[in-house]
Image: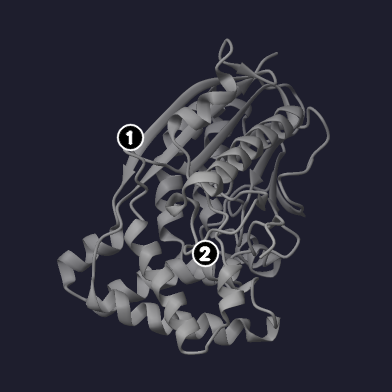
């Protein structure tokens, strides 16, 4: 099979599914709010409208709390009359209809009581230039930069880079390092001098664990089962790779090893935090195994299944594939309920004046 690189992932499952099921990324983003507020208070501001960039917004629900927090902190510095532009960035195929519905109608929308806040969106990958140079005061990216720009090669027998070895793992490590530098250099160009960039990512513990290894193993087994029973072909399965790459703290800091600087960015904070599985915590209280399984399957389906479905020969099979995969994963997780406690990395960077 060809090792030609492919696009790293499809967009999140549409129709508001990601908004409904992405509680784990929401929890990781919430852990970073104190760092975001601190970054706002350290911004160098001028008298121009303040620009906040939300890199990787998906369908918008998980952006509301951080944008509210940032705006509230900004208002203590600028007063009520300074215009604040909030620009949500995601791939062109993102479900922007749901995003704009959230921005317009959600009772927790950040503009509800502030007429000088102006939301907008841009359909473009953040592995490209998104804004003019020196345009952004505050950048925020939560759980989006975990996705690689491309998949360098297939992973024999598995769907995640963490389970790969040898030449395959080395190819993913190189791609991840290159993408992180590319992401940082692009954001550095777009930030104003004195601006701040706050990036939140799923992290790895000191021993290299993400907390999701059992869930990915179950998903991998489901795909093997689907091949054996004819739901997908072996060729389709072989192309199914997830371009998500959680990083260690050392990998995030590697570009800054020379004088703590990279492209005029310096690191102000880099923190690893444990992220408990709230679905499991609720299960321990109410014993509702069906709800626990539904939440775990919904999380995996809304975030990862669209990427797996890009390997199908016929795109018209995507809905059948997603439903069948979810049905089989539900059965497996119901038989083996377990918590998926994970980790969140938050890195805060400043651009030099």
Measuring from the top left, give residue 303's x and y in whole percent.
52, 64
Identify the residue under disc 2. 303
Residue at horizontal 75 percent and vertical 33 percent from the top = 49
Identify the residue under disc 1. 206
- Whether residue 87 sits left or right of residue 341 in the image: it is right
Instruction: Identify the image quadrant of the N terminus.
Output: bottom right
- Whether residue 26 sits left or right of residue 105 in the image: it is left
- Whether residue 352 sits left or right of residue 24 in the image: it is right
- Whether residue 323 sits left or right of residue 101 in the image: it is left
Q: What crowding class fits label 1: few (fewer than 14 Cα within 10 Å), some (14-19), or many (20 or more)? A: few
Q: Is residue 32 placed above or below 331 in the rendered structure?
A: above
Number of marks drawn: 2
Measuring from the top left, give residue 248's x and y in whole percent.
44, 35
Give the structural element (helix, strand or loop) at label 2.
Answer: helix
Q: Residue 236: name its quadrant.
A: bottom right
Q: Is residue 193 placed above or below 320 in the rendered structure?
A: above
Asked whether residue 15 is in view, the answer is: no
The answer to which of marks 1 and 2 sits earlier in the sequence is 1
Give the structural element (helix, strand or loop) at label 1.
Answer: loop
Q: What crowding class fits label 2: few (fewer than 14 Cα within 10 Å), some (14-19), or many (20 or more)? A: some
């Amino acid at each position: 099979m060809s090792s030609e690189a492919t696009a790293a992932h499809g967009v999140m499952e549409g129709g508001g599914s990601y908004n409904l099921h992405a509680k784990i990324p929401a929890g990781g983003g919430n852990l970073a709010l104190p760092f975001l507020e601190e970054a706002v208070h350290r911004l160098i501001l001028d008298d121009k409208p303040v620009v906040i960039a939300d890199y990787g917004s998906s369908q918008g629900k998980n952006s509301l709390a951080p944008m509210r927090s940032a705006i509230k902190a900004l208002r203590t510095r600028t007063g009520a009359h300074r215009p604040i532009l909030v620009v949500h960035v995601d791939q062109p195929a993102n479900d922007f209809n749901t995003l704009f519905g959230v921005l317009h109608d959600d009772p927790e929308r950040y503009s509800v009581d502030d007429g000088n806040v102006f939301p907008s969106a841009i359909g473009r990958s953040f592995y490209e230039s998104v804004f003019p140079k020196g345009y952004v005061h505050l950048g925020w990216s939560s759980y989006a930069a975990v996705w690689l720009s491309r998949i360098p090669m297939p992973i024999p027998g598995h769907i995640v880079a963490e389970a790969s070895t040898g030449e395959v793992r080395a190819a993913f490590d190189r791609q991840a390092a290159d993408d992180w530098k590319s992401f940082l250099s692009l954001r550095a160009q777009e930030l104003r001098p004195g601006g701040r960039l706050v990036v939140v990512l799923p992290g790895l513990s000191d021993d290299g664990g993400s907390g999701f290894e059992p869930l990915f193993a179950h998903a991998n087994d489901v795909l093997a089962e689907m091949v054996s029973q004819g739901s997908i072909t072996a060729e389709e399965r072989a192309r199914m790779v997830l371009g998500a790459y959680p990083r260690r703290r050392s990998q995030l800091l590697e570009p800054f090893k020379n004088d703590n600087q990279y492209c005029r960015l310096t690191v102000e904070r880099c923190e690893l935090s444990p992220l408990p599985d709230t679905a499991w915590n609720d299960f321990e209280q109410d014993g509702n195994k069906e709800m626990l399984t539904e939440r775990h399957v919904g999380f995996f389906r809304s975030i990862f299944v669209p990427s797996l479905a890009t390997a199908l020969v016929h795109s018209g099979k995507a809905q059948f594939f997603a439903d069948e995969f979810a049905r089989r994963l539900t059965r497996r997780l119901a038989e083996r309920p377990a918590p998926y406690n994970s980790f969140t990395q938050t890195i805060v960077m400043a651009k030099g004046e």
